[in-house]
Image (cartoon, grey):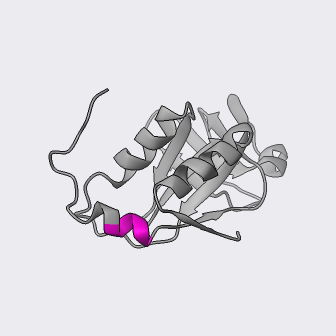
Amino acid sequence: MLEITHGLHENLDMIFDDCKIVIRDGMYAIARAKEFTGDLQFIPFALIYDGAEWTFILEENDLEFIEVDSVEKGWRILTFRMNLPFETVGFLSAISAALAQTGIPIFVISSYSTDHVLIKNKYISKAIQTLRGLGCKFQEG
């Protein structure tokens, strides 16, 4: 097993002591569209354009309002309710490594002040158990 320690934030254990996660209500989809007019009848959780395609993260029942090329349904969103300094090194690495060790695939996005991990609903119980093992606490969403 690969052990990574170089460059990790020296207070990572303290950061996990303050780790609070909200599991958002509802089921989410990750969808791709090659074209998008910019006209939305809903507010997506996230909308990303990388120059080649649009990625929507949205509630599954909002899929009827957009035309997409591909979609993955059945996701839950775990939002880390904590402000991490931009200098923090290794937080997402520790989260993804712990989940990977238990066989849980993830989709990750970050906003200005926090991180969001999307996990397929069929893995949610196992993910909660794994993240509690890191010291994370869960709050109602």
Q: Position of residue 127 (x, y in %)?
A: 61, 46
Instruction: Report the quarter where the C terminus lies.
Output: bottom right
Q: Is residue 69 above or below residue 113?
A: above
Indicate left or right for 64 with 120 as reference: right
Judge by depth and name the residue closer to the eye, 10 or 53: 10
Q: Position of residue 99 (x, y in %)?
A: 51, 40
Residue positioned 20% across, 45% down in the render: 5
Q: Position of residue 75 (x, y in %)?
A: 69, 44
Based on the displayed image, in which of its 4 quarters is residue 40 positioned? bottom right
The question of residue 53 being in magenta is answered with no
Q: Is residue 141 above or below residue 6?
A: below
Highlighted magenta segment, given as a residue range: 14-18
Indicate left or right for 74 with 111 as reference: right
Count of all numbered marks drawn on residues in the image: 0
Residue positioned 43% across, 73% down in the render: 18
Judge by depth and name the residue closer to the eye, 90 or 38: 90
Residue positioned 63% across, 58% down in the render: 45
Indicate left or right for 46 with 51 as reference: right
In this view, the residue farthest toward the front is 133
Residue positioned 21% across, 52% down in the render: 8
- SS majority, magenta: helix
Instruction: Report the quarter where the N terminus lies.
Output: top left
**Can residue 81 be seen by looking at this rendering?**
yes
**Can residue 113 be seen by looking at this rendering?**
no
